[in-house]
Image (spheres, rainbow, N blue to C red):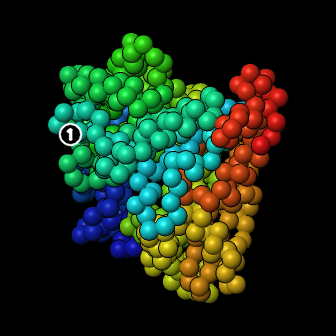
Amino acid sequence: MSASAEDPYKCSRTKPCELGCCRLDETGDSGNCGAGPEFCGKDNCHSQCSWKSECDPGWGIQWSNMSSCPLNVCCSDYGFCGTTLDFCNGRMIAKPECAITAGTSDKRTIGYYEGWNAQRACGHMAPDEIPLGYYTHIFYSFALIDPHSFHVAPMDSETASHYDEVTSLKAKQPGLEVWIAIGGWAMNDPGPFRTAFSDMAKSTASQDAFFDSLVSFMLQHNFDGVDIDWEYPVAEDRGGVEADFDNFVTMLKRMRQHLNRAGRRFGISITLPASYWYLRGFDIINLEPHVDFYNVMTYDIHGTWDSTVKSMGPYAFAHTNLTEIDTALELLWRNNINPSRVNLGLGFYGRSFTMKDPSCMRSGCEFTEGAKGGECTGTPGVLSAAEIVKILERDDAKMTLDEAAAVQIVTWDTDQWVSWDDQKTLKMKQDFANRRCLGGTMVWAIDLDDGTLIEELGKNLNRPKSPVYNGTYIVADAATYNSGETEEL
């Protein structure tokens, strides 16, 4: 068969390989692409002869870029890293298994609070409107790192003005912890903060400046811990460098030691991506001893950005697909991460699309762009849970359960499409977290809800709701709460 421009595994005298070395067949006119000595050896190779495979399946490191794959994923017979059965020659990874009724994930319910939500057009949630009694932890988002002094820096004046209002909620809910989340996606966007994490992590003097500032900041505002949301170390497209892999471990180890000397117990957590592409920049095995837990962002698995990814394309898929979440967590199990130190990410929002063909509105159909921005959030391609609840009041709105993905698909206005988690699918994800023996769940974000989702999430928790001071008295004191006899609120 002659080389075809459509076949990336074929080559010819004039057509090079997209991936691999070109070995011509007996005719000398066309051939196949591959790796290792069979294709790249000097007696066999026609072109791209210096090409190396991603990993070494056994033909020798001189033919490969790495001896093995990051995160202990499989190296296929063809020298590529992956996790599917094809890559792993049928070998399956062992997954944690617990009885759903054990309720392992009920231990922690973390809610991120967007400190800038008052800057939206509507749909605001002031600190005193945060629902209490449900969350064990509130993570205030975000603070940043000054790229010059490496001190804790405000995201903006409005966001910084509410620190104390949120930490004061601890007086209303005994046992509640409020942590500061530092970083976030936007911090690593092009701009002055882009390399602040990398620059701080590579210097012990810069680390010490950050640690001292962090302790002072947390003591001043009565925070109980810090969530490091670095998106993402090592990733070149996010301002990362190769040295981040080791430097992050050194930084976290020294941070833990520094906070332990602060005279007060402070928690540390790390936010992890659900994708192999970005997670491979984290040394999750050596980071784990220095953190209280990992928060895995098992949302945003799909979005409008898929249109620019060659392996994906402009096709609408749910951003919290449970099948894909299960696969993503396998990356942790391959590295023996303790599931009790893992929190499953839940989205109180949906990823939305404008569909190309109104007659094709299923998952997997083609989209042209993000759906219209919401009245309050205003960003095309994303809608808050509160906005989706309002959409469902429309006569033309239709919601369909995708049982396998454990998501709801809402369509309206002829060509608008959004995936989200409602009361039913949140329960499915909580059951999954318990079946995988996870130690908690975490929500992005508290203020995107109108109360609909957190109330349902709380109903499914196999624990009494936390005691809350309602303005005149505490419904149940801490002793009663800890005994498990708290009355339902």
Q: Position of residue 248 (x, y in %)?
A: 34, 29
Residue 171 versus residue 481: which sits nearer the camera? 171
Tell me if 349 is positioned left or right of 56 in this view: right
Height in image: 275 above or below 176? below
Height in image: 354 above or below 81? below
Q: Position of residue 20 (x, y in %)?
A: 33, 54
State which quarter of the image contains the C terminus: top right
Tell me if 209 is positioned left or right of 269 in this view: left
Q: Amino acid at mark 1?
A: Pro
Figure quadrant of residue 320: bottom right
Q: Residue at left 45%, top 57%?
A: 117
Q: Position of residue 421 (x, y in %)?
A: 65, 59
Q: Residue at left 44%, top 38%?
A: 164
Q: Which residue is mark 1?
A: 147
Residue 22 visible in the current orientation: yes
State which quarter of the image contains the N terminus: bottom left
Residue 268 versus residue 290: which sits nearer the camera? 268
